Image (cartoon, rainbow, N blue to C red):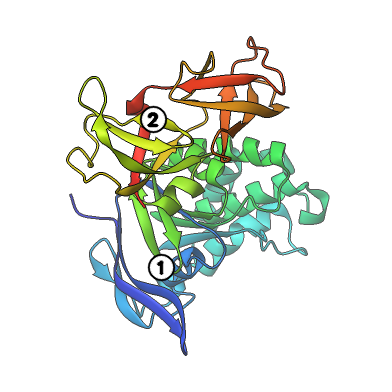
Amino acid sequence: MSSKLEAIGIAKRYGDAVALEPTDLAVQAGEFLTLLGPSGSGKTTLLQMISGLVAPSAGRIEIDGRDVTHVEPGKRGIGMVFQSYALFPHMSVWDNVAYGLRMRRKSRDEVRGAVDDALAMVRMTEYAKRFPKELSGGQQQRIALARCFAYRPSVILLDEPLGALDKKLREHMQSEIRRLHKELGATFVYVTHDQDEALTLSDRICLMNQARIEQVGTPADLYDRPATRFAAGFIGHSNLLEGALDDTRGASGEAILLAAGGRIPLPMNASVASGAAGTRHTLLVRPEAPRLVEPERGFVDGTIADIVFFGSDTRVQLAMNDGSELTVRCERSLSPRIGDKVGLVWDPYRTTLLQA
């Protein structure tokens, strides 16, 4: 299947500073792709080159198979939503949404119909005559979305559009953006540094680090099967257990990792099935995987050092026998106490082995 949007060898340098290494990325029609990563990872630079706001140092951008690398932003058929909203304070809500259509010389009837449809889509019809200063942050963001949606671009770029909102409003707007994406059927490319936001919204996530792509996959891929140590540590809460392969095998022939002061069985399909004893590895164990058992009855033992209440569950911080730390998510029905000695056991197939 051909891609809606494709970056081919795209790169950006500012003198000796590398903002983006040569990068290939394909986005399918109707897909919601999120560019996720820490500050300075290259995600905003990539988005700006797709939009045409920044010229690449190398490579090209294609939309529907057409090379748009040197096409000015307004002629790429792309919509853009910014974190700052960028609304005109002297214009009413209705006129803000109409602005892009008027610049494209649409007829009066076309403008009226498109603006009314866009305001209805973001549920802001009753605010049409108000001015931006009379709206809340969430309402202003809806108008910024409506202005973009009004002329129905087939590709919509969103640069941390919810970054200025509080947590509750941000979660509400995430639901709204998901709804709007489904209604429009457009291709969304969304930039954020918020991993929860990326997991919630995306069909696929492009995780970036140090000016390059670290891993591309579905939210489940990145959470359950991270390809690198960085991906394992950046997505979700992580326990990264460092250890070496034992020279003996488990009862079922599985490889054993000596880590966190214990003997940890690895899944039979692990890539170290025939690895040499002493080889160093990192094992990812998500906090929801372990189960508390009696001391010396688990893979590893530790002492409960702290307990944090999260509402739906409880996070237990453990000091392991080798001095490392490990976090476990427990059901509220359990009542562990600080100072208790416990063992931990889990399904080996719920862990991921990384090369050290």
Instruction: Estimate the x, y position of residue 323 in percent, counting from the top left.
Output: 58, 40
> Residue 71: which quarter of the image?
bottom left
Query: Is 120 above or below relative to 337?
Result: below
Q: Residue at x 70, y 40 (%)?
A: 167
Q: Position of residue 227 (x, y in %)?
A: 34, 48
- Residue 20: in sight, yes or no? yes
- Compared to 335, does 18 lie above or below? below
Instruction: Depth check: give the residue in front, 36 or 223.
Output: 223
Q: Which residue is mark 2?
A: 263
* Left or right for 247, reference 174: left
In this figure, what is the number of numbered marks?
2
Q: In terms of image quadrants, where is residue 255?
A: top left
Please give the name of the residue rendered at 47% of the width and 77% of the height, measured from the top-left corner. Answer: 54
Secondary structure beneath dot 2 equals strand
Q: Please identify, in this view, whether the residue under mark 2 or under mark 1 is nearer the observer.
A: 2
Q: State if disc 1 and disc 2 touch (CB < 8 Å).
A: no
Q: How far across and down, in percent of the image, does residue 93 sit?
A: 70, 53
Identify the mark at residue 319; answer none if there is no mark.
none
- Residue 224 in view here: no
Left or right of residue 179: residue 248: left
Give left or right: position of 93 versus 51: right
In the picture, residue 98 is in which quadrant?
bottom right
Secondary element at image label 1: helix
Q: What residue sits right under mark 1 in the picture? A: 50
Q: Nearer the viewer, residue 62 or 270?
A: 270
Three-letter code for the amino acid on which mark 2 is drawn? Arg
Identify the residue at image location x=44%, y=53%: 230
Between 15 and 292, which is closer to the camera in this rendering? 292
Point out the residue furthest to the right here: 134
Residue type of the residue flagged with mark 1 = Ile
How would you rate the neighbour count of disc 1 (Cα within 10 Å): few for under 14, some for 14-19, many for 20 or more? many
